Amino acid sequence: EVQLVESGGGLIQPGGSLRLSCAASGFSVATNFMTWVRQAPGKGLEWVSIIYDEGSTYYADSVKGRFTISRDNSNNTLYLQMNSVRAEDTAVYYCARGLVGVTAFDSWGQGTLVTVSS
Amino acid sequence: EIVMTQSPATLSVSPGERATLSCRASETIGTKLAWYQQKPGQAPRLLIYGASTRATHIPARFTGSGSGTEFTLTISSLQSEDFAVYYCQQYYYWPPAFGPGTKVDIQ
């Protein structure tokens, strides 16, 4: 069974750093493309970042230069390093698996809430 | 940058009735469109990709159609578990982009 479990969210001050984790089971993060999508409270979905199986990474303009996506193949875990966070980064962050051959996302974690506030 | 719009913002439907949701892209995207369902407090669930292909385990009452800039998600006979927010997402242009969502609630 495919499962994704996020962790690492919490309250953080503006300008601070946080690392989100997404533990995968039932498949390998090394051979699938993986993504982070966020949802601000009461708002819609916003794509954040993607990492492909060959290792290339891409970011939304809103987080480029501040966030870094990575993975640990041995632990089958996806990460999102968040630096220089801003109030507008407050959201539930979901990790998701990409559907083979399609930039759509077929399995999602339950999400982890990041609140940026002083 | 491509803009996705969805209409209506809210759709009130009685159980057993048909629901028709619309998604429009500001530029043509072929059939590079997906639909997701999200219930309160839950993660999104992929329903449709390629504009009309149902994802694994998605019931046949969900039908996607359209191409180019106009797309439709039809739920043929609404069940109680179908009341949720529905998002479309294009993946023709970079970056992938979601629409603002349509909330389907009980009339």
Image (cartoon, rainbow, N blue to C red):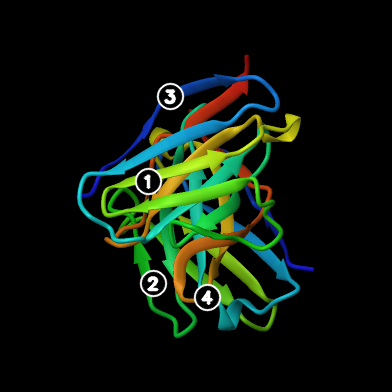
Label 2 and label 4 in one chain: yes
Which label sits in the foreground, 2 or 4? Answer: 4
Residue wearing tag 1: B71
Q: Which mark is residue B43?
A: none
Label 2 crowd (10 A; few <14 / some 14-19 / many >=20):
some
Depicted B67 relative to depicted B24: above or below? below
Chain ID at mark 4? A
First along the sequence among labels 2 and 4: 2
**Which residue lies at the image location 36% right of the left edge and 56% below the top edge?**
B96
Q: Secondary structure at mark 4?
A: loop
Q: Amino acid at mark 2?
A: Thr
Chain ID at mark 2? A
Residue wearing tag 2: A57
Q: Amino acid at mark 1?
A: Phe
Residue A106 location, x and y as percent?
59, 61
1 and 3 marks in contact (CB < 8 Å): no
Distance (Cα) linking label 2 and label 1:
29 Å
Residue wearing tag 3: B9
Residue A47 location, x and y as percent?
42, 52
Distance (Cα) linking label 2 and label 4:
17 Å
